[in-house]
Amino acid sequence: MTQANDNGPGGPPKLTALVVEDSPPMRKMIVFALSRVRGLTVVEADDGVDALRRIASTKFDIIITDINMPILDGLKLIKRLRADEAYRDVPIIIITTEGAEEDRQRALALGATSYITKPIQAPQVIELVREVLGLAEDRR
């Protein structure tokens, strides 16, 4: 078990999420939603290249990414991650404006775990992340 996930007896799991989104307002909304998932630390990246830099120094338990981003888009990011042994099985959630079925199929074929079309609601993101990570709902 990695140290990031070593939560000791009885505590909430310590997990780390990477949010890759080039739109600051959308990134802030996703980060705010994820801040409500107990035990989840959130790191932000503003595009695919920034994400690769962060991945080089931190092991993430889940990645949430947009598709349409400058330089390195979300689909190329997924392809790179799935080629990396350390990220072959890490859940990747796509949150995008691309609602066409062929876009969805292409993302899932490249290795995305789940696909949400914008506009999104915070509860929808929270529920999906908890489901993908196998976390019980926080009853506070």
Image (cartoon, grey):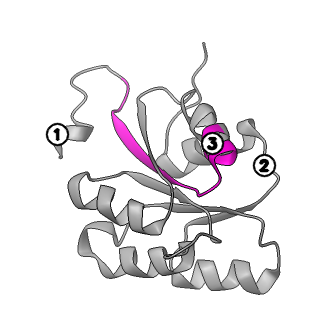
Question: Which residue was labeled with disc 3?
Answer: 30
User: Which residue type carries mark 2?
Assistant: Ile
From this view, report whether residue 43 is shown above or below residue 70: above
Q: Quadrant of the C terminus?
A: top right
Percent x, y of residue 59? 27, 53
First in sequence, mark 2 or 3: give its number. 3
Q: CA distance from mark 2 to mark 3?
A: 9 Å
Using a 10 Å C-alpha cutoff, classify the residue at mark 2 as few (fewer than 14 neighbours), some (14 to 19) or many (20 or more). Answer: some
User: Which residue type carries mark 3?
Assistant: Ile
User: Which residue type carries mark 1?
Assistant: Gln
Q: Secondary structure at mark 2?
A: loop
| Magenta extent | 12-28
16 is within the stretch colored magenta: yes
From this view, report whether residue 93 is shown above or below residue 30: below
Q: Name the residue furthest top.
A: 140
From this view, report whether residue 35 is shown above or below residue 82: above
First in sequence, mark 1 or 2: give its number. 1
Is residue 56 or residue 89 the one in the foreground? 56
In which image quadrant can residue 103 be found? bottom right
Percent x, y of residue 22? 59, 58
Percent x, y of residue 57? 21, 54
Percent x, y of residue 3? 17, 39
Is residue 126 or residue 77 the one in the foreground? 77
First in sequence, mark 1 or 3: give its number. 1
Residue at horizontal 24 percent and vertical 61 percent from the top: 56
- Nearest to viewer (mark 1 / mark 3): 3
In which image quadrant can residue 74 be found? bottom right
Residue 3's disc is: 1
Question: Which residue was labeled with disc 2?
Answer: 120
